[in-house]
Image (cartoon, helix red, strand yellow):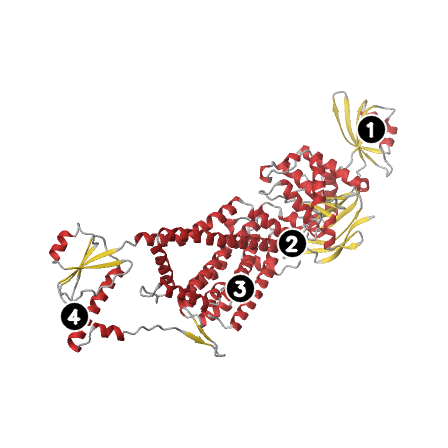
Amino acid sequence: MEILHIKRVYKTYAEHKALHNVSIHIEKQRIFGLLGPNGAGKTTLIRIINQITGPDQGEIFFEGEKLAPKHISQIGYLPEERGLYKKMKVGEQALYLAQLKGMSKNEAKTKLNQWFDKFEITTWWDKKVEELSKGMAQKVQFITTVLHEPKLLILDEPFSGFDPINTNLIKKEILELRDKGSTIIFSTHNMESVEEICDDIALINKSKKILDGKVADIKNEYKTNIYEIVFKGNLISFTNALWTGFELLESKKQDDRIIAKVKGLRMDSSVNALIGAVLNDITIVSINEHIPTMNEIFIQKVNEVMPDDLPEEIN
Amino acid sequence: MNKIALIIQREYLTRVKKTSFILMTLFGPILMAGLMLIPIWLGLKDKDIQIIEVIDDTRQFINQFEGTNTIQFYYEFKSIDDAKKSFYKDKYTSILHISNTDKNTTAYLYYKKQPGLSTVSKIESTIEKGIKNIELEKQFNISRKQLDEIQPKVTVKSVSIDEAGLEESKNVGVSTFLGFGGAILIYTFIFMYGIQIMRGVIEEKTSRIVEIIISSVKPFQLMMGKIIGIALVGLTQFSLWIILSMGIYSVGMGVLASSNMNQLDFSKEAITNGMSSESENEISENKIEQQINEMFSQIPITKIVIAFLFYFLGGYLLYGAFLAAIGSAVDSEADTQQFMMPITIPLIFSFIMASSVMENPDGPLAFWLSIIPLTSPIIMMVRIPFGVETWELLLSMALLVLGFLGATWMAAKIYRTGILMYGKKITYKELLKWLFYKG
């Protein structure tokens, strides 16, 4: 079932085009990656979903209903630029933010105690935010984002500034939240950081969506059909064994073994077919298919769709 | 709970719980009461009694000098040289020497401690009167007793008549005092708490919490919550100040009064002198009291209090909206300078104009400044004690309401865009553009 449907959205700031005809479907209980370089329009799109700003054109549907202020309490948002009131106490502040999301004071208090127990930070309740370290503040921010158990959780560059321990903690929590029924939107320019946990993605470049779909499908579609094989034996007999099915791209000798890159020539090439072809002539040490990273797919796609618009950062 | 109420609650509680607020609230009245009491106390200290030895070579001024609380005259029949010789042995603070009764005579006052101007002028007028009496008796055979009998005592009371024929007497002194006092309070309130709004907005922006909050509430709700919350802080502080100041003032007055009964008279004198020039020492105590009551009964107190609260809040809301917009457009308080100018100018201008308005409270300058929303909170407060036509007051109030609604609308537009804008030097042109951005 669909939780969010963004339908042909346009947004322009003065001279700057932020979003141009962007349409995205997001299924329930999935982790959705909104990927693209800085300035592509991700944050603008997120602000539109959060109703901080409105689109110039286009519509957004939340669970099939037109997006309206009443949906605010069902969305949790961790912005890229995030902070807390420095002079306020942690507990007081978390209560305040929860109440702004529409929770009652008692409900918020119970839930907060649960989360504080879980993260082992119960002693922080009466501390002022300015006394916390950055990593500690990040935990508090994450709790305030998910406290009201939103159906849709939007995290904008969630791991920028997080230390590895917090990153893992948050990743674990996010997977747990998804399994409990939440949908998560991840927005980031650092594509490698999320591809392992995303189910679906959309790529945005220069205000336009250039690609979207299931991560597995995209990877399949963009697979290069290139394999890397390490073996012991004779390179000539290996090359002969490849025969009509594969083509040797490059090889290099390392001690007593050879590392070779081969490209499959048939549509149905696979690791199995490669093994079958060479099994009798050499001793295989390791073999694997080269899977393109999101970054590589992004560059390839931008080159296809708008060759002049490749952002420098990615090049 | 309503979201805007939550915001108001937070803005209010975080400020009221601050140590600086509590300290200011407690020490403010001590400071204010001190400012009121110290001049009185100093006045009491300074008021040493003048005991004057009168050496009159002409023998014409026997019993002509009437003493008061502060000046006592002793007529001595000795020569000036003898008086001077024994001066430092005697109780007298100064010697008055009159050598003749010529029309343009010069009398000498020898002193240990410089007498005040009022003492000198009192002596001058007594001698003048004495010489006049002598001449009247000499030339026209009119005795002093006859003269006293026909001495008139005249008071002028100004009474205004409005179109309906309703008569009202006014006291310019009290009106000036009340008008100026109200103007100062409004001016201070707008500045003190307006700046707090701006600081609050900048704090939210620089701490980057603002985006989290506006994903839960509308930017307008956040802005209005802050403005209203701080207004309540201001009202709380002012009411506490007034209550505490009154308390401290009355206790202080009690202490001063019980230490010396004369001092009470003096303080009354000080009050009446400060407010009106017509009160002089001859007026009896009862009459002073009566006069004070009369003065206040002539002033439309209820009207002033209601108008004060209205212009207090109206002016604050108007300027508060502008200051919130400024806060949203900048990254730090240091950047506010260029935008503060056009906001402070009308405030300071109206403050400077207040005295001209008091000179002519019904003139065209007074009228226009009290109608235009940017200056009306201060100028109308100055005018009201002098009496303002109802239609003028209503027009001014209506325009102020329109003014702050308009200002809030503009501020909300700038605020909405500004709070999410970082690291950009904002110009007036930019602000103008933000006004026309679509939601």
Q: Which residue is mark 2?
A: B4
Label 4 to label 1: alpha-carbon separation: 142 Å
Q: Secondary structure at mark 3?
A: helix
Q: Residue at x 15, y 68 (%)?
A: B101
Tag 3 or tag 2, which sits nearer the N-term?
A: 2
Q: Residue at x 60, y 51 (%)?
A: B421
Numbered mark located on residue B306 in the image: 3
Is residue A127 positioned above or below B21 on the image? above
Residue type at numbered disc 4: Lys
Task: Give the camera-side residue of B214 and B314.
Answer: B314
Q: Residue at x 56, y 59 (%)?
A: B317
Mark 2 and mark 4 in contact? Answer it, CB < 8 Å. Answer: no
Label 2 to label 4: alpha-carbon separation: 81 Å
Numbered mark located on residue A239 in the image: 1
Mark 4 and mark 3 in contact? Answer it, CB < 8 Å. Answer: no
Q: Residue at x 70, y 53 (%)?
A: A51
- The answer to whether one can see residue A21 in this image is no
Tell me where residue B234 appears, x and y as whole percent.
53, 54
Tell me where residue B85 appears, x and y as whole percent.
13, 52
Numbered mark located on residue B103 in the image: 4
Residue B182 in the figure: left or right of residue A263: left
Label 2 to label 3: alpha-carbon separation: 26 Å
Tell me where residue A133 appears, x and y as whole percent.
60, 36
Q: Give the mark toward the camera: 4 or 1.
A: 4
Mark 3 chain = B
Mark 1 chain = A
Q: Would you call the spot at circle 2 few (<14 residues within 10 Å), some (14-19), or many (20 or more)?
A: many
Q: Quadrant of the C terminus of chain A?
A: top right
Q: Give the mark toward the camera: 2 or 4.
A: 4
Residue B261 in the figure: left or right of residue B343: left
